[in-house]
Image: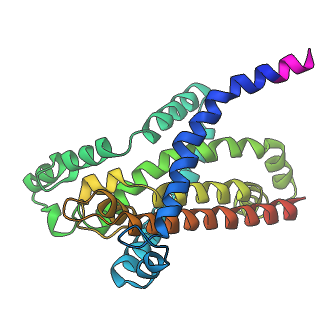
Amino acid sequence: MHRKVTLFAIIALLPFALLVVGFLMLPLIAMIHDSFLSADGRTYTLEQYITALTSPYYSKGIVNSLKISLYSSVIGMIIAFVVSYSITRMPKKIQNFMITFSNLTSNFSGVPLAFAFIILLGNSGLFTLLFKEWGWNMTDTFSLYSWSGLVLVYVYFQVPLAILLLYPAYSGIHKQWRESAALLGASNLQFWLRIGIPVLLPSIVGTFSILFANAMGAYATAYALVGSNYNLLTIRIGSLIAGDVATQPQLGSALAVILGLMMLGAMWINERLMRRFRRDLQ
């Protein structure tokens, strides 16, 4: 009987295993293999990695991706931290509605999100023209197709995801803790600094790492908004693999491996920090 159950479990998992191997493992192995090939695809070399790490053009793309991921993650975390707490203070029905709304908006990204922002805040967007009628030419101080516009769009799809991840963490802060702290003479600020935020720190660090990886890997939104006019790592990878002029899949594979290593590094740092915070709380 036990063998039959084991055999059934293996057979049931076989389609999933084939899916993982066919759509994740094989492309990953092929990408790593191609990253060590020369431009002609015949000899093995570290030329692609040397070019990716020493060329100012590609180095700038890596730095820009790190900066926009860091900025959008920090801003998104601050907004989500406040909004998540505000949601917990609302009636249960409104809480359920807000979480459902956040769940829907967290999936609104890519080309549709960029198109929506262009309609609203582009050079001929709805709000741009409306503000112009009111006497404020918004394009003099803000451009959707600039660094600040990219950060705004990134923050938009970061905030709902951060809310979904932070909202459950507030259930770990019990009402009795606040009452006990108040009886002992602690102010609301002292409670959050000494009890609330330390309890939430593992969730905050984990959420930040997910937001950072989410922003690092974003491609469709940025490409639909600025095309190849802004130097981001994902856009450079896309142009090297499927460019209109000339393709360099080996160099694109090397940049993709570097991107993957950066994400793994962020996850490793997050794991180390979460272990430390949890150990300090015990």
Residue shown at the point (73%, 61%) measured from the top left: 271
Residue 177 position in % (x across, y down):
83, 48
Prevailing secondary structure class for the magenta stretch in the rendered image:
helix
Could you tell me which quadrant the N terminus lies in? top right
Residue 148 placement, left or right of 90: left
> Looking at this view, is 193 or 172 the one in front?
172
Residue 92 placement, left or right of 2: left
| Residues drawn in magenta | 1-6
Residue shown at the point (45%, 70%) measured from the top left: 37
Q: Residue 70: in sight, yes or no?
A: no
> Looking at this view, is 155 or 272 the one in front?
272
Residue shown at the point (48%, 50%) measured from the top left: 159
Residue 179 position in % (x across, y down):
82, 47
Could you tell me which quadrant the C terminus lies in? bottom right
Q: Residue 232: in sight, yes or no?
A: yes
| The quadrant where residue 181 appears | bottom right
The chosen color scheme is: rainbow
Residue shown at the point (28%, 63%) measured from the top left: 247
> Looking at this view, is 84 or 144 the one in front?
144
